[in-house]
Image (spheres, coloured by chain):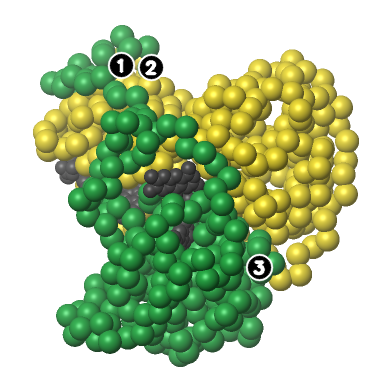
Chain colours: A green, B yellow
């Protein structure tokens, strides 16, 4: 079974995003960038499937700028076999990313697409669901457990109120939630080895996909700031303050 | 213009999230219909019909709709989409599962987690864990949105809409429901609770979490939440997680106990009206958003708080 893992280069999760003064977006100049944490979880799961013998090949793919090659090298160092960069400097909307991935899938024919449930920059939580809709494949989102066998994936999903288990026939799209696994750190020898693994670069234009934006960004602003509060000395002080504030 | 709101329910009762999304729909303008799709819809539809300003309630019933399978929900809604300019779904884990599928089938963008309706085609939503608010204008013929319920007031009752049933789609061929473990709690639901008490990594064990957080929540009539660290460590179930990638809450009162206040946690609770933090580290970032901070070991502070609440007649 071939597994395709879409990975995204995003602002590092430890960095607090700052809005640009001209309200056109978020300032990403000189900001530390990393692989989206949910994509790391997806790569880890794919590599574990290969280690267990359930997968034969793991292909990482990213849609983004030249620098996204670093993100793909990280996936290779974690254990992916090869990588594809669909290169573009455009900021693609989730629907466009899904269409690009669909075009890559038409060439690669994977039986499983394992990806993050959400990118921590756009926070859209949309690409996986959109991709499965475009492919007419079944979807299993927010996975906390994945088992492959008998031409299907049995996926336990994190839902409101608890957990749901579904079977999806392969090929399918599965999106990873936080509890699926704890991604490994790439070891130094594996980072070295990753430099020699194949990384194919395609120009976005060569795929013939319509990626025109559907949305126009009117402005990006800072959220409302909270007023600084006070420190109280005792639990009794706290209760009297809460009574005054009218919330008890 | 017509807006379709997809109701949030558990096949038994209608959830207040629906009323909140109806308010967002009314801000867009035009006729507002509510779709109740599930395995047992009559009582829920009757509730939805009472929401003031709703034109019509549509119901569709099948086992797969009751299980919330994304393929079934998307097929149903895409079939109804011809009559609507906007399709609004509450941004619950259920809604986030099927709404992007609808958008892709209609070949339109989805705008996720909308917190403000600027006009019928322009909406604001948080990005980057709520550290930036993005306003976008959609050029698509149909607008598919998930709406963050905590950002809107619940529409009042007082209406008497008609209820009409529509055909359910065929069962999805490639997805089968196996089972689910849903925990029924007597406490208020996290998403809509007036008070939330959350515990963090400081609890150290599931037993301690239950011993410290739950009695305080019960005393306050509160829902229980947790940080990701507490959930990952198994102190609390996964659906207690408050944050960027968990549940977003905005109660009247949020009490964070032994939680440091990471960006990802703040993203889920910083719109609460009043925030209380109990943390032994005076420099913990949670104090930067707390209205009332108590620098103390929770082991002493929570029992004292329990007694102070009792003394105050709680
Ligand atoms: C300045 C700026 C302005 C922007 N303006 C807009 C805008 O107006 N509207 C808009 O929709 N977007 C805009 N974007 C892009 C947006 O932030 C998202 O990157 C994009 O919409 C994809 O959504 P997401 O990453 O939130 O997807 P999600 O659905 O949250 O991502 C889920 C998963 O999809 C996969 N994935 C996502 N993107 C890629 C990728 N590029 N390559 C490979 N896999 C991927 C990953 O597996 C990821 O875990 C802007 C970006 C910038 C920097
Ligand atoms: C992709 C991604 C998504 C994430 N999503 C979320 C999310 O949705 N929600 C979320 O919460 N986190 C999320 N996180 C995790 C987040 O970054 C933090 O790691 C997490 O919130 C920390 O939890 P905590 O505050 O309980 O633990 P810690 O940061 O370890 O804080 C524990 C606090 O307890 C205090 N303490 C210890 N002992 C005591 C005592 N006896 N009395 C009083 N105080 C005490 C300490 O001073 C400390 O401040 C995410 C991370 C990533 C990478």
Q: Residues within 10 Å of mark 1 (few under 14, many from 20)?
A: some
Chain-order first, disc 3 or disc 1: 3
- The C terminus of chain B - image quarter: top left
The quadrant in which residue B128 appears is: top left
Chain-order first, disc 3 or disc 2: 3
Q: Are the two marked residues, 3 and 2, in contact with CB atoms closer than 8 angstroms?
A: no
Q: Residue sitting at 86 percent across and 32 percent down?
A: B163
Question: What residue is disc 1 on?
Answer: A242
Q: Secondary structure at mark 2?
A: loop
Closest to the observer: B236 or B5?
B5
Mark 3–mark 2 distance (CA, rounded to whole Å): 50 Å
Classify B95 as above or below A187.
above
Q: Residue sitting at 69 percent across and 40 percent down?
A: B142
Question: What residue is disc 2 on?
Answer: A247
Q: Secondary structure at mark 1?
A: helix
User: Comparing marks 3 and 2, which lies closer to the viewer?
Assistant: 3
Residue A216 visible within the image:
yes
Question: What residue is disc 3 on?
Answer: A135
Mark 3–mark 1 distance (CA, rounded to whole Å): 53 Å
Q: Residues within 10 Å of mark 3 (few under 14, many from 20)?
A: some
Mark 1–mark 2 distance (CA, rounded to whole Å): 6 Å
Classify B176 as above or below A10.
below
Where is residue A93? Give x, y as percent.
51, 51
Where is residue B235? Give x, y as percent.
34, 53
């Amino acid at each position: 079974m071939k597994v395709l893992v879409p990975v995204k280069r995003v602002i590092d999760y430890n960095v607090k995003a700052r809005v640009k003064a001209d309200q056109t977006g978020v300032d990403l100049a000189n900001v530390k960038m990393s692989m989206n944490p949910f994509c790391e979880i997806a790569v880890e799961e794919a590599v574990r499937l290969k280690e267990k013998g359930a997968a034969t090949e793991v292909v990482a793919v990213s849609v983004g700028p030249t620098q996204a090659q670093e993100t793909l090298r990280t996936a290779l160092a974690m254990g992916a076999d090869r990588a594809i960069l669909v290169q573009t400097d455009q900021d693609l909307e989730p629907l466009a990313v899904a269409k690009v991935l669909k075009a890559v899938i038409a060439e690669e024919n994977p039986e499983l697409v394992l990806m993050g449930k959400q990118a921590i920059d756009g926070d859209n939580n949309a690409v996986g669901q959109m991709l499965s809709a475009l492919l007419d494949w079944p979807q299993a989102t927010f996975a906390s457990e994945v088992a492959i066998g008998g031409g299907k994936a049995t996926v336990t999903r994190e839902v409101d109120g608890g957990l749901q288990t579904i079977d999806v026939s392969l090929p399918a799209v599965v999106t990873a939630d936080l509890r699926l696994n704890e991604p490994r750190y790439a070891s130094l020898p594996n980072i070295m080895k990753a430099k020699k693994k194949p990384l194919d670069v395609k120009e976005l234009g060569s795929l013939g996909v319509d990626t025109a934006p559907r949305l126009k960004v009117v402005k990006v602003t800072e959220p409302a700031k909270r007023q600084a509060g006070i420190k109280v000395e005792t639990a009794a002080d706290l209760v009297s303050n809460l009574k005054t504030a009218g919330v008890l | 213009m017509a807006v379709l709101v997809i109701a949030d329910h558990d096949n038994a009762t209608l959830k207040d999230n629906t009323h909140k999304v109806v308010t967002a729909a009314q801000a867009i303008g035009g006729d507002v219909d509510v779709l109740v799709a599930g395995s047992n819809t009559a009582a829920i539809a009757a509730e939805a019909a009472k929401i003031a300003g709703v034109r019509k309630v549509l119901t569709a019933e099948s086992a797969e709709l009751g299980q919330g399978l994304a393929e079934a929900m998307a097929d149903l809604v895409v079939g109804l989409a011809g009559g609507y300019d906007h399709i609004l779904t509450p941004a619950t884990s259920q809604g986030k599962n099927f709404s992007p599928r609808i958008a892709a089938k209609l070949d339109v963008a989805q705008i996720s987690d909308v917190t403000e309706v600027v006009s019928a085609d322009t909406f604001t939503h948080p990005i980057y864990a709520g550290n930036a608010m993005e306003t976008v204008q959609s050029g698509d013929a149909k607008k598919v949105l998930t709406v963050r319920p905590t950002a809107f007031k619940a529409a009042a009752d007082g209406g008497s809409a008609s209820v009409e049933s529509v055909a359910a789609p065929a069962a999805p061929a490639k997805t089968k429901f196996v089972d689910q473990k849903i925990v029924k709690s007597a406490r208020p639901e996290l998403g809509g609770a007036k008070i939330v008490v959350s515990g963090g990594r400081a609890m150290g064990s599931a037993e301690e979490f239950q011993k410290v957080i739950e009695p305080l929540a019960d005393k306050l009539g509160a829902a229980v939440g947790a940080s990701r660290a507490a959930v990952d460590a198994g102190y609390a179930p996964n659906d207690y997680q408050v944050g960027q990638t968990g549940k977003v809450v905005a109660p009247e009162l949020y009490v964070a106990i032994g939680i440091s206040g990471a960006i990802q946690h703040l993203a889920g609770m910083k719109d609460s009206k009043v925030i209380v933090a109990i943390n032994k580290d005076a420099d913990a970032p949670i104090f930067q958003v707390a209205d009332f901070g108590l620098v103390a070991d929770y082991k002493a502070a929570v029992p004292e708080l329990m007694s102070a609440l009792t003394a105050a007649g709680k």
